[in-house]
Image (cartoon, helix red, strand yellow):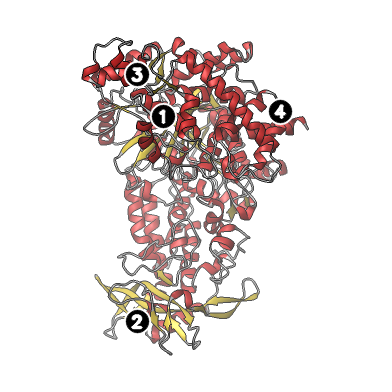
């Protein structure tokens, strides 16, 4: 049969414009830039770039579609920016508030599901952010682009259907926000992984959908003509031939008692429940068995492709599921089925099947021992029949003459790599056996469903065609690069907005997991600059933090001043959360808001404690505008420069936040808390290598004089007007939830409690004690309640007039005390021994006294001669580190840090920041 895939071309035949040049066709454009890229690849300096993928020139060129996509660092990114973006203009007014988004929205959308990836934020969750922070034609960047959803979102802003636009506009109107400005945005996507950027390119570069539909059907038809016989089985009537949908393979073990062979599925799988039994008898000796007691049974085979013998777990087919006409049937394999398997096993591998050795990596040598599964090379992932199918699929897709159709055929076919491999688990309780891999890990189960290519890809082809018919991609809107986010070939101040979902800690081992698919392309990730915690690669949390800091510093460099970055954070560890915050601040960003989606209530909550990092968080951070930086460089670290920062920072913070749902409440905005504002200001000065010019007590005393304070939040005068208007409409204010995890949070809890209700010690104690427990940090000493009260609050002893704080509370809550003077004996008797929050002037005196006591205790830490400080007061450490930093005594910070338990240092943002800077200063000095 003639190869139909060679019978058509679908490239553009009309003139096309690209980066200011006109070409007679899209094919001519591609050939021109491929020639330039081929010359570039011969330059040793170009190939020596950090993060440059591993692969031959031919393999890189085969994946690439320059200048829009290169499977290596894209040398045309600067040209893309120059040609399409608007230069930074400080005179152009720009102001946005942070925007909270729901990162789970859109996971059922056909475009989102068109290609799977280990983690991805749906494009429909990103669209509102791009609409909010940018205008049509603005340039968006995602340096950890993964499968390219940020690019899809940027284009969706211009091609979204009318129904979606109406729905979003109505939602924004209900929230009191102006209607978005629709229109596509330009986007630059970057990722370290060639597998990721290839997916992103096919999502974001235009192609002829109808031509792909024809080519996809022809590919599957040709495969049927060539190897359809491999998936035929005799029906139970002994006459009719059926089409195999999938064959279930069972691993064979041995009994530890009698050494008899045990077919796992036949003996362990319950026929009725279709679940593995907790215990089952040996079919030979009757001994009680569990899966953990079984011993692996291997067969030894010679592998001609690596020239050595290998040990493979013994597997046997136990069930064949097939179709006859429209009926689905199943049976045990017969002699013909077993003979067919043996015949196929004797065939040579198709040339397209990679026989690449799997390098040492965490995913295959620590988390899941692939050598136990007999897998040391890529072709070992596939049983003989699956290898024949997968190899021919790949070979035929690569043979298509049109470059874009060829790439999209591979986009479809590569999704069968995992699904046709032995990683595809048999799920007897599931209707479909397609793509039943365990996500995020290489795991070979004892039950494997070997699917036919038509069963695996037939439905996928139809879904792809339907999804991309509805999603219109424009040419020239996207540029895609493969390399490290720590080195982006972009000019300074070029990008209008950044949306990014970087790798967090050791959640996902992207380079390891992508190696399987990348081996088929022949271009693999350079894992050296991967931002990850990986013990196998000797990358610990500090290494991860410094890698992320380099990436954020690059983001900071290319982002226009005054513009925003949204970071999606997905890690439950407080230490990783603090590493990200420190990396952000060290790079120069200022965090304006951190929100988490409450999955149960469908509402947003602001994060008030590092112990609350249990869900996807959305971090809104901005690059301070050029005016603030210029003024700082002119004046230096003065008290007025501190207030200049606060003035600028308050403009960036949200003014009103409202809960969703029927009963609306005003949310307390955490970033407007006076202490949080001080922390942001202090971090900004420390990042600039300057001493913080104002102490905490002085700052907190002066803040209400310079600005407006309402409900414990700080506002600019014009912002307070807006907040009070909202408060008149929505009188209920929902206070932020506080967790007591350390001394500072205990003081904050008591402050909140006593502001509302000045109380005696006996009234405070039963309310306070239950708040301390699971949230308390390991090794953290929280002083006793009496000491906390004594050091931070005032107690009325019954002499003199009743303080106004207590008077206000008592006269409002006790009828018999209303209208009494502050000197009235009845009021004084009721007020006696009540603790209350001091006014700012007295609070300043208390704070200075407390700071002195903390530093005195820090001296005992300095004098400690043991190896580790097992317990410590966090407030003492913070005060000591601040004082040492102010005195430029960096060695003291480093010495004490080395005596602390790892979690004490890594789970506190303030300590970690000063320690990291102290290390930098000592390294610079040496």
Circle 3 sits in a helix, a strand or a loop, which is it?
Answer: helix
- Give the residue number, with chain letter if any, for mark 3: 806
Crowding near pointer 4: few (<14 within 10 Å), some, many (20+)?
some
Gap in angstroms between the C-alphas marked 2 and 3: 83 Å
User: Dot 1, crowdedness within 10 Å: few (<14), some or many (≥20)?
Assistant: many
Q: Closer to the camera: disc 2 or disc 1?
A: 1
Counting residues from the start of the chain, the first of labels 1 and 3 encountered is 1
Give how far across and how far down residue 731 sits, in percent: 25, 22
**Residue that mark 1 sits on:** 750
Answer yes or no: is residue 770 visible: yes
| Element class at badge 1 | helix
The residue tagged 4 is 889
Lower position in the chain sequence, tag 4 or tag 3: 3
Asked whether, in this view, residue 710 is left or right of residue 878, the answer is: left
Q: CA distance from mark 4 to mark 3?
A: 44 Å
- Residue 177 x, y percent position in the rendering: 31, 23
Give me the disc on residue 332. Answer: 2
**Mark closer to the observer (2, 3):** 3
Residue 710 pos. (x, y %): 36, 17
Residue furthest right in the image: 926
Q: Is residue 648 above or below residue 607?
A: above
- Which residue lies at the image location 56% right of the left edge and 11% below the top edge? 640
Tag 2 near tag 1, CB within 8 Å: no
How far apart in space, not on screen, are marks 2 and 1 (Cα)? 70 Å
């Amino acid at each position: 049969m003639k190869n139909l895939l060679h019978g058509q071309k679908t490239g553009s035949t009309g003139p096309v414009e690209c980066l200011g040049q006109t070409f007679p066709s899209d094919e001519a454009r591609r050939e021109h830039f491929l020639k330039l890229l081929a010359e570039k690849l011969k330059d040793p300096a170009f190939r020596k770039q950090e993060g440059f993928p591993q692969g031959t020139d031919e393999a890189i060129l085969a994946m690439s579609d320059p200048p829009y996509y290169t499977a290596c660092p894209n040398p045309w990114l600067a040209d893309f920016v120059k040609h399409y973006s608007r230069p930074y203009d400080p005179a152009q007014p720009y102001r946005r508030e942070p925007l909270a988004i729901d990162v789970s929205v859109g996971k059922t959308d056909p475009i989102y599901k068109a290609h799977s990836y280990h983690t991805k934020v749906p494009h429909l969750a990103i669209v509102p952010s791009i609409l909010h922070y940018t205008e049509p034609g603005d340039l968006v960047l995602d340096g950890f682009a993964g499968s390219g959803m940020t690019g899809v979102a940027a284009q969706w802003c211009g091609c979204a259907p009318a129904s979606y636009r109406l729905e979003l506009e109505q939602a924004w109107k209900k929230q009191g926000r102006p209607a978005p400005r629709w229109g596509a945005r330009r986007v630059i996507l970057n990722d370290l992984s060639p597998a990721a950027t290839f997916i992103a390119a096919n999502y974001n570069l235009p192609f002829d959908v109808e031509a792909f539909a024809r080519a996809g059907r022809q590919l599957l038809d040709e495969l049927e003509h060539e190897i359809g016989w491999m998936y035929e089985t005799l029906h139970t009537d002994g006459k009719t031939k059926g089409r195999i949908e999938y064959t279930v393979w069972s691993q064979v073990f041995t009994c530890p008692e009698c050494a008899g062979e045990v077919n796992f599925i036949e003996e362990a799988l319950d026929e009725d429940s279709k679940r593995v039994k907790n215990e089952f008898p040996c079919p030979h000796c009757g001994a009680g068995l569990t899966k953990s007691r079984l011993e692996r049974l291997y067969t030894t085979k010679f592998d001609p492709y690596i020239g050595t013998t290998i040990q493979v777990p013994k597997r046997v087919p136990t069930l064949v599921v097939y179709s006859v006409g429209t009926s689905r049937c199943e049976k045990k394999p017969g002699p013909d089925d077993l003979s067919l398997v043996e015949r196929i096993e004797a065939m040579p591998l198709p040339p397209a099947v990679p026989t690449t050795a799997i390098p040492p990596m965490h995913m295959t040598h620590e988390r899941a021992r692939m050598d136990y599964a007999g897998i040391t090379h890529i072709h070992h992932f596939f049983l003989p029949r699956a290898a024949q199918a997968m190899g021919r699929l790949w070979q035929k897709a690569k043979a298509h003459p049109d470059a874009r159709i060829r790439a999209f055929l591979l986009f479809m076919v590569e999704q069968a790599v995992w699904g046709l491999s032995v990683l595809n688990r048999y799920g007897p309780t599931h209707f479909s056996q397609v793509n039943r891999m365990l996500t995020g890990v290489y795991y070979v189960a004892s039950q494997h469903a070997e699917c036919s290519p038509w069963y695996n890809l037939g439905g996928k082809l139809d879904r792809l065609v339907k999804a991309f018919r509805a999603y219109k991609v424009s040419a020239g809107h996207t540029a895609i690069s493969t390399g490290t986010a720590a080195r982006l070939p972009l000019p300074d101040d070029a990008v209008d907005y950044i949306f990014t979902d970087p790798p967090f800690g050791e959640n996902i081992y992207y380079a390891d997991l992508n190696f399987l698919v990348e081996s088929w392309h022949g271009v693999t990730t350079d894992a050296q600059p991967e931002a990850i915690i990986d013990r196998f690669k000797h990358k610990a949390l500090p290494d991860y933090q410094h890698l992320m800091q380099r990436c954020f510093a690059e983001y900071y460099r290319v982002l226009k001043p005054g513009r925003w970055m949204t970071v999606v954070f997905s890690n439950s560890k407080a230490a990783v959360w603090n590493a990200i915050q420190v990396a952000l601040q060290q790079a120069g960003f200022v965090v304006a808001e951190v929100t988490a989606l409450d999955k149960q209530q469908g509402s947003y909550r602001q994060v008030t404690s590092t112990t609350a990092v249990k869900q996807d968080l959305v971090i809104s951070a901005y690059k301070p505008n050029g005016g603030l930086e210029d003024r700082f460089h002119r004046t230096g670290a003065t008290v007025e420069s501190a207030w200049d920062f606060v003035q600028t920072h308050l403009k960036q913070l949200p003014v009103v936040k409202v809960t969703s749902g029927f009963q609306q409440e005003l949310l307390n905005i955490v970033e407007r808390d006076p202490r949080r504002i001080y922390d942001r200001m202090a971090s900004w000065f420390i990042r600039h290598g300057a001493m913080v010019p104002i102490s905490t007590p002085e700052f907190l005393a002066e803040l209400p004089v310079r600005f407006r304070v309402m409900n414990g939040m700080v506002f600019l005068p014009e912002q307070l007007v807006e907040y009070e208007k909202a408060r008149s409409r929505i009188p209920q204010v929902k206070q932020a939830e506080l967790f007591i995890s350390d001394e500072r949070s205990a003081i904050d809890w008591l402050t909140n409690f006593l502001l509302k209700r000045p109380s005696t010690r006996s009234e405070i104690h039963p309310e306070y004690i239950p708040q301390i427990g699971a949230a308390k940090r390991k090794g953290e000493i929280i002083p006793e309640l009496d000491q906390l009260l004594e050091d931070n609050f005032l107690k009325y002893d019954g002499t003199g007039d009743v303080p106004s704080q207590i008077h206000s509370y008592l006269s409002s809550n006790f009828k018999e005390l209303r209208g009494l003077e502050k000197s009235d004996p009845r009021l004084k008797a009721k007020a006696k021994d009540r603790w209350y929050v001091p006014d700012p002037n007295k609070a300043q005196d208390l704070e200075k006294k407390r700071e002195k006591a903390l530093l005195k205790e820090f001296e005992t830490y300095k004098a400690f001669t043991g190896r580790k400080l097992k317990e410590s007061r966090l407030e003492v450490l913070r005060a000591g580190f601040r004082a040492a930093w102010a005195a430029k005594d960096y060695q003291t910070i480093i010495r004490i840090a080395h005596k602390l338990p790892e979690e004490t240092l890594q789970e506190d943002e303030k300590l970690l920041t000063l320690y990291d800077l102290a290390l930098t200063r000592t390294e610079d000095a040496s």
